[in-house]
Image: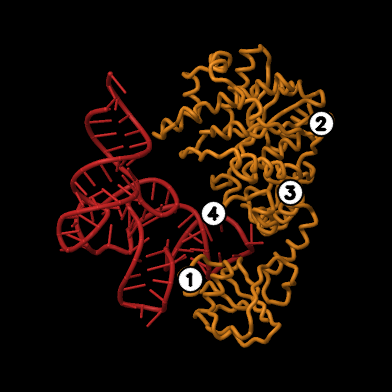
Amino acid sequence: MKYKSSFINEAVARGFFYQSTNIDGLDDYLTTSGRLGYIGFDITAKSLHVGSFIQIALLRLFQKHQHKPVVLVGGGTTKVGDPSFRNAARPLLSDGEISENMEGIKLCLLPFLKFGEGESDAVIVNNADWLDELSYIPFLREVGCYFSVNRMIGFDSVKSKLDENNSLSFLEFNYMVMQGYDFYELLRTKDCRIQFGGQDQWGNIVCGVELVRKKLGKEVFGFTSPLLTTKDGRKMGKTANGSIWMLENMLSSYDFWQYWRNVDDADVIRMMYLFTDIDLDEIKKMENIRGQELNDIKVLLADEVTAIVRGRKSLDVIHETATAMFSKGVGNISSDSSVPKYSLKKSELASVSLVDIIVDGGMCTSRGDAKRLLRNGGVYINDQVVSEDYKILPDVQSGDCVKLSCGRKKHLLIMIV
RNA sequence: GGAGGGGUGGCCGAGCGGUCAAUGGCAGCAGACUGUAAAUCUGCCGACGAAAGUCUACGUAAGUUCAAAUCUUACCCCCUCCA
């Protein structure tokens, strides 16, 4: 074991560590339990998505090693907007939206962290509580004087915006000052000396570390984790169909599970380390698995992650649905699986076209789209390709089920009533 | 405030009076191959329509023209330089 603290050891072994302001100092500091460490989350949406997953998992690990996670929600900073690596300024949110989003964020975190009053129980704070109160002139005199603009424009987050000829408003430029101030405030009021974050937060974190050192002469620590990209370089948690949200009302458990079931071969083991509670030794044994067998590992990954985020009991229905979706025939689709259903009166059989059902059932966005799919041979009825827009489905009776498929992965169960 | 450059489909980016629903790339969808992976190859990729075709769309609004993404004017926004 290279490090003295159990947390740092495991965090490094699992791949959470990218860089730190002083890893040895931090290691020493964490040999005593009950230390505080925080991560800030912006609250631009009602739910966190998988992009923030690594941060949440890190806090969870922190708590597992008897330390106290502090979740900082950016009620104040969200009103400013982090300019980091975005080419469009974020839309500014109203107070109403912000407080609504904040409730959602809390829900997302409940499965991961134990909140409460105990020594290692997580707490949640909102930086609006102190940022909203600041008065401009005193703030500039007490805090602003410690920030060098020369230095700030050197930070990647700012530099990339300037280099790409994008506009950077003064509002956004202040983001890192705000975030630096957060760290100072949390140190002062809670003796919180650690800030975690993604690699892209490095500049912002360093600002806080320096502010505390200059103002109070104390050392605080920054710790960043690698920015998770998939093997093809895309940001994790985003698919073409949207983000992989944590909350069930924004993404079904089945789709959540599918995301993990379909990760790239090359990413499976890394995600296993980061996102599951499976022992390091167990995962180590899986490292050499290749080829088709890796599919079982993907299922395990999907199961474990889904169990944490959505609860283990959700797995039964998911497995059932997955089996139904990927096996042929109608018989093995049970009515409690989450395969979408569509009911159709027997009397409507003659008048309703396939295209209508496809669009109505949400499988295509427009009739033209559905027709194209049909023409391209991507539509199946009971696993048989159909190439024309049948006005009438194959001879069926009331009570029958017909499986309508668009491609291999989208299915609709038509119940004849 | 002044001078110059620019705003094109989900994104990047051509086009600069008719042949433009708009080259190309990325992303996406379907098919082949497979392992619900990746890579590769093929087809598709604004809406409506069986089709002919109709409609909507090149920052916004007016205008010139038989005809405008392309020309004119005003306005809005972005970038660069100067004050």
Q: Report the amino acid beneath label 4.
A: Ala
Between residue B55 and residue A109, name the one nearer to us.
B55
Q: Which chain is orange?
A: A
From mark 2 to mark 1, how far is it between C-alphas? 56 Å
Q: Position of residue A398 (x, y in %)?
A: 69, 85
State the mark number for residue A120.
2
Between residue A335 and residue A297, name the one nearer to us.
A335
Q: Which residue is mark 3?
A: A309
* Crowd around label 1: few <14 · some 14–19 · many ≥20 (10 Å): some
For the residue labelled by badge 3, is the local secondary structure a helix, a strand or a loop?
A: helix
Which comes sooner in the sequence, label 2 or label 4?
Answer: 2
Q: Which residue is mark 1?
A: A367
Quadrant of the rendered image containing residue A98: top right
Which comes sooner in the sequence, label 2 or label 3?
Answer: 2
Question: Could you tell whether A350 is left or right of B68 in the image?
Answer: right
| Chain to which mark 4 belongs | A
Q: Is residue B38 above or below residue A397?
A: above
Which comes sooner in the sequence, label 2 or label 1?
Answer: 2
